[in-house]
Amino acid sequence: MLKNLNYNLIAAIAIKSRGLVRYDRCIEDASDCPSCQKIWKKIKETDEELVSLMRDEIEKHLKEKRFD
């Protein structure tokens, strides 16, 4: 069984990744509202950064043999 901190990282990546798939559609749907497009693009960018940060942390745990 995974420690909660590792499980939480994986769960959060899964949630953010599902959102990332949807954001391009949200940006497209907001084609007549530049300010809405800007918001969706910023959300997508932020979530991509967060997924990367969490992925890096998981890799760190793996290298340090703390992924249990």
Image (tube, rainbow, N blue to C red):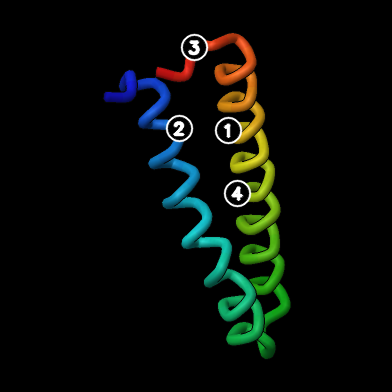
Q: Of tags 3 and 4, which is closer to the observer?
A: 3
Q: Of tags 4 and 1, which is closer to the observer?
A: 1
**CA–CA distance between discs 4 and 1?**
10 Å
Q: Secondary structure at mark 4?
A: helix
**CA–CA distance between discs 1 and 3?**
15 Å
Vertical placement of residue 2 versus 46, above or below: above
Mark 2 and mark 1 in contact (Cβ < 8 Å)? yes
Q: Looking at the image, tell me whether mark 4 or mark 2 is earlier in sequence order.
A: 2
Q: Quadrant of the N terminus?
A: top left
Could you say which disc has been placed on residue 66 in the image?
3
Q: Residue at label 2?
A: 9
Q: Secondary structure at mark 1?
A: helix
Mark 1 and mark 4 in contact (Cβ < 8 Å)? no
Total number of numbered discs in the rendering: 4
Q: Residue at label 4?
A: 47
Q: Position of residue 26 (x, y in %)?
A: 57, 77
Residue at point 56% right, 17% down? 61
Q: Secondary structure at mark 3?
A: loop
The picture quadrant where one finds residue 30 is: bottom right
Name the residue type under label 4: Asp
Could you say which disc has been placed on residue 54 in the image?
1
Q: Looking at the image, tell me whether mark 1 or mark 3 is earlier in sequence order.
A: 1
Vertical placement of residue 26 versus 41, above or below: below
Name the residue type under label 2: Leu
Q: Of tags 4 and 2, which is closer to the observer?
A: 2
Residue at point 68% right, 87% down? 31
